[in-house]
Image: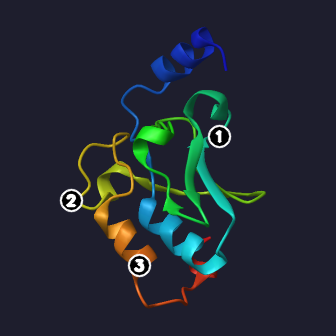
């Protein structure tokens, strides 16, 4: 998406609630599906907002090795698991208190705890 189009969409949606990438949901899906890779980005704007967040052989990709911008009033945050694209967001007013910021959140402790937990079964139907 070009800069002017992004500006117009942003202006048109000013004041609307933000959709924030849901790291806890992503962690549950990654834990259950065991993908080779996982990426996150905003629908229709992956070129500018998306990046790899997980690799099977090493786990979460460090923030300094990728780029993501994962909050928007108009573009849906998505999780790409191998070749599957999944809407993966939580509304700003529902974001856990321990997450600082909105688009700045990157692998919060709650999501890392899910990845490292002994629990292996999650109700994916409910998550999707």
**Residue contact between numbered discs 1 and 3, judged by CB atoms under 8 Å:** no
Q: CA distance from mark 1 to mark 3?
A: 28 Å
Identify the residue at horizontal 59%, vertical 9% (top origin).
Answer: 4
For residue 94, above or below residue 20: below
Dot 2: within a 10 Å radius of its alpha carbon, few (fewer than 14), some, or many (20 or more) residues? few
Residue 106 x/y as whole percent: 38, 50
**Residue contact between numbered discs 3 and 2, judged by CB atoms under 8 Å:** no
Does residue 15 appear anywhere in the picture? Answer: yes
The residue tagged 1 is 43
Where, by quadrant of the figure, is residue 2 drawn?
A: top right
The residue tagged 2 is 97
The residue tagged 3 is 116
Where, by quadrant of the figure, is residue 24 drawn?
A: bottom left
For residue 93, above or below residue 127: above
Residue 29 x/y as whole percent: 58, 72
Identify the residue at horizontal 54%, vertical 35% (top origin).
Answer: 74
Q: Nearer the viewer, residue 119 or 77?
A: 119
Q: Nearer the viewer, residue 102 or 16?
A: 102
3 or 2: mark nearer the eye? 3
Dot 3: within a 10 Å radius of its alpha carbon, few (fewer than 14), some, or many (20 or more) residues? few
Dot 1: within a 10 Å radius of its alpha carbon, few (fewer than 14), some, or many (20 or more) residues? some
Return the disc, 1 or 2, that comes first in the chain's sequence.
1
């Amino acid at each position: 998406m070009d800069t002017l189009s992004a500006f117009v969409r942003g202006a048109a949606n000013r004041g609307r609630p933000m959709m924030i990438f849901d790291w806890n949901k992503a962690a549950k899906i990654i834990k259950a599906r065991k993908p080779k890779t996982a990426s996150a980005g905003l629908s229709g704007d992956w070129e500018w907002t998306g990046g790899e967040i997980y690799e099977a052989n090493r786990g979460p990709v460090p923030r300094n090795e990728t780029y993501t911008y994962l909050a928007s009033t108009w573009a849906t945050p998505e999780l790409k698991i191998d070749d599957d694209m999944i809407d993966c967001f939580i509304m700003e007013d529902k974001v856990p208190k321990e997450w600082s910021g909105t688009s700045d959140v990157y692998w919060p402790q709650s999501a890392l705890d899910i990845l490292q937990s002994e629990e292996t079964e999650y109700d994916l139907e409910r998550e999707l």
